[in-house]
Image (spheres, rainbow, N blue to C red):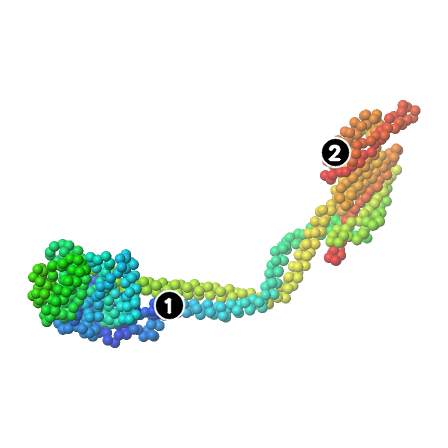
Amino acid sequence: MKTKLAGLARSFWLLLTAVPGWPDAPRIVRLGRALPVAFPFAIMLILVGWKAAVRDPHLQSMRAQNRPLLLLESQIATLRLNCSEQEAHDLAGRAAELSHSLIAGPKQLAEVSNALQKLTAEQHWESDFHAIEGGTGAPVEGTQVAFLRLKGKLTPTPDNAQPFSTLVMLLDGLSREDPRIDLTGLAIRADEQGRYSVETHFRLAYRVSHEKAAQ
Amino acid sequence: MTPANHSPESSSDRLRSDPAAPARRSGRRTARRSGQTLGIAWLHGSLTAAVFRRQTREGSCTIPRPVHTFEEFGVAVDEVLARLEFAGTEAFLVLEHEQFIHQTEAVPALVDRAARTYLQARLTRQEKDHGRIVWSAQKTISARQESAYLLHLLPVEFFDRLSQVVLARRLELTRILPLVVPLQFGLGSLPGTRNQPVLVAADMGQATAILVGTPEGGVAFARTLRASWSSEPGRVGVEVNRSLLYAKQKLGTVVNRIWLLGGDDATAEVRAKCGESKEITAQPAAPTDWLQAVAGLSPRDPVNLLAGHRQWLHRRGLIRRALGAAGWLGLVLLAAAAWTDMESARAEDRRFARLRTAAPMLRAECDRLTERNREVTRERDFIQQMVNGRVPPVPARFLAYLASLTPAEGQWTDFRVERDDSSGGWSFHLAGAIEADEETARASLGALQRRLETGPFRAHFNEAVRLVTATRTDGGRSPLELQSFNLGGTLFEN
């Protein structure tokens, strides 16, 4: 094996350094002859060695040193990809619009009751609204919308000649979007004389403050 | 065998550094491709040369003094070149020298390729003891089963020195042939009976070449003996006779015809030694004739000692060129890759520098985006909850719808619609009365139920309607039959 390797090396040496017509050429001439072939390989070897021994370790070190910044940049890119500025703007606008249709909270309940009373009075109905006990309980965790429950008792005024039609109109007016009031229950009783006694159940949504939702 | 480690193909480098090189002939330097070929017959101390142009002899000369050493050979070649005004570079050599050995080697009956491999193995072993050699082989004819090859063996050292002399004179040696080759070519042109073996003895001045072959060109064997026809005709006669006996053994037939090429000097002795029955013909022959015979021989002819060597040199040159080309190509590609790598590393450097500079800003931006996305998620959830949490005004619509379906004789006393927050469904309860008999009231209620079931609210009733009949008197008139009823069930939002 050793002999074969030596023979192979000698053949390769001859292949590289043989000077045509000069079998006993001196070493320096042989080296000169080998130069055009050996030079590129030598340079390649140097390049590869430089890359492996100098350049790559330097790059790796530099990358390791700046890894937190790269991660930060990557994180920013991911965050940007998750939602565009336009989408965020649109969502904020839509949420604000929806928030605007809600009451501010339990404190606004009295104001809403007054407004509803005024509305019923316009339709010749007498009304009495009050919050249902427990209807303003703590919102469920994770939800941003909580509800207040309002119970109303309505009786037509003596001058109301058409109680049913005014009631239908009134109910239409009470189920409204701004502020958002949901009619969740309706009970109507009529006695033999045709007198109506109406009971309504409303649900009013309000937005839980961010701090609470975040908790 | 093992080819020499140099090539006779290019001599310019050698000329520059060889102090022994003769003065260059500018005429030959400028007319390298003149189409002329120089043939040299160096036969045991005699040297004859001829110039050929496409196998046509244009001139010849013979060196009148003995040429034995390489120095003498070099001087003789210079003289030949000058006298013949040779303008080309290609040269061939018909060589007979004491170091140029011809020997017959028996080979088992194999195909040619295998036989050559066998010979090569034999010679490789021989080289270990006697040094490297350049060789060629000719298959011989034989009456025996086994094959035999006539080997022409030239030491590499001799070949190298010969090449140096030739290359120093800007000559490209393309062929080295033993004298057997022109003699073999001449067999076919000898007059006489076909298919009969013939012995040819050629005078080389101080030696004699003997060849036995057939006019078809087959060679039985060949040998060279150091005997001059002029000084040792008796020995020549004896050796010719011994060759006849050997030929008889080898061919299994008697060789009756003998050709003596070179003159009559040995005819009498040959006849005396070989017997009167032999047909002996003597004719003059000159080395120029032998040069002429091989002038058109291709350098690739297997008898050419340089055929394999030239092929090997050519292959080595190709490999060297391919290696060089691959090296330069690889270097260019690697350099390009390294340059690209460095550029990208530089760009990366710049990027890192930018990142370091902008690090506080990036952190702030990251915080802002994190907060923004958290807000977006919250807003999205809020919108979703708002959309999902919408409650349609079912009670009011159902009331209006029911009013439109109520029969004229009916009246409602109780209407209740409630939403179940846990399931999100709607339940209803209705109570009323119809002024009619039971059958009419049941029909009216059935119609009402069907309308409600198939209507927009798709009401589903919990149980069958039950009627309670009552009688009512009104102001002394005939009593009215009053059917009271209760209905309950669920509604589907529309």
Tell me which residue sits at (79%, 34%) in the image.
Answer: B463
Residue beneath disc 1:
A4
- Mark 2 surroundings: few (<14), some (14-19) or many (≥20) residues within 10 A: some
Asked whether residue B488 appears in the rendered view, the answer is yes
Tell me which residue sits at (53%, 67%) in the image.
Answer: A59
The residue at the far right in this view is: B476
Asked which quadrant contains residue B53, the reply is bottom left
Residue beneath disc 2:
B453
The residue at the far top in this view is: B478
C-alpha span from label 1 to label 2: 101 Å
| Label 1 residue SS | helix
Q: State the quadrant of the N terminus of chain A.
A: bottom left
> Tag 2, which chain?
B
Left or right: where does residue B23 sit relative to residue A72?
left
Tell me which residue sits at (85%, 29%) in the image.
Answer: B483
Left or right: where does residue B2 sit relative to residue B418?
left
Tell me which residue sits at (32%, 64%) in the image.
Answer: B316
